[in-house]
Image (spheres, rainbow, N blue to C red):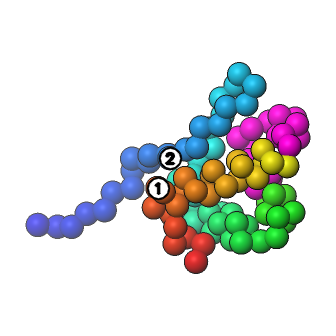
Amino acid sequence: MPNELNFTEKHTEVLIVRIDEKEYSIPLATSIPYKKAKSLLKLAKADEETALDGFLEFFSQYIPSEVLEELTMRELTMLAKAWTGQTKKEGGQTLGE
């Protein structure tokens, strides 16, 4: 019996973020290409300013920049930590290591 690994059906794991009555879906590291996921997970270990700048750039692909720019530092930090935490929960904990 042949062994088979099939990647034709993609399942995207996302973090749902609600901001002012709107809902946004941000794919987790487990659902984006390895190279991008690895660089994002390394940001979690960077200094806060570098990390937030990198996450802001990534999140702006899924949340309009004008919405992100209105978030406080606390909210942006919470968003980055939630995304990283959910990624680890979904099995991506070793991607950045």
Q: Is residue 15 left or right of residue 44?
A: left
- Residue 31 marker: none
Residue projecting furthest to the front: 74
Q: Which residue is pictured at 86% across the width and 43% down the height?
A: 72
Tag 1 and tag 2, C-beta contact below 8 Å: yes
Q: Which residue is pictured at 71% across the width and 22% down the height?
A: 21
Which amino acid lies under the numbered mark 2 shown in the image of this protein? Answer: Glu
Which amino acid lies under the numbered mark 1 shown in the image of this protein? Answer: Glu
Q: x%, y% of residue 93?
A: 52, 67
- Residue 90 marker: 1
Segment colored magenta? 55-72
Q: Which quadrant is the C terminus positioned in?
A: bottom right
Q: x%, y% of residue 39?
A: 69, 68
Q: x%, y% of residue 43?
A: 73, 67
- The nearer-to-camera label among 1 and 2 is 1
Q: Secondary structure at mark 1?
A: helix
Depth check: give the residue in front, 32 or 94: 94
For the residues labelled 1 and 2, the Cα–Cα distance comes to 8 Å
Q: Is 82 contained in the magenta span?
A: no
Q: Which residue is pictured at 82% across the width and 64% down the height?
A: 48
Q: Please say if 36 is above or below 67.
A: below
Q: Which residue is pictured at 62% across the width and 58% down the height?
A: 84
Residue projecting furthest to the left: 1
Q: Is 57 contained in the magenta span?
A: yes
First reached walking from the N terminus: tag 1 or tag 2 = 2
- Quarter of the image where one finds residue 20: top right
Query: Would you name the residue on which mark 2 appears?
Result: 13
Q: Please say if 64 is above or below 61.
A: above
Q: x%, y% of residue 3?
A: 21, 67
Q: Secondary structure at mark 2?
A: loop
Q: Does any portion of residue 25 appear in the rendered image? A: yes
Q: Please say if 88 is above or below 69.
A: below
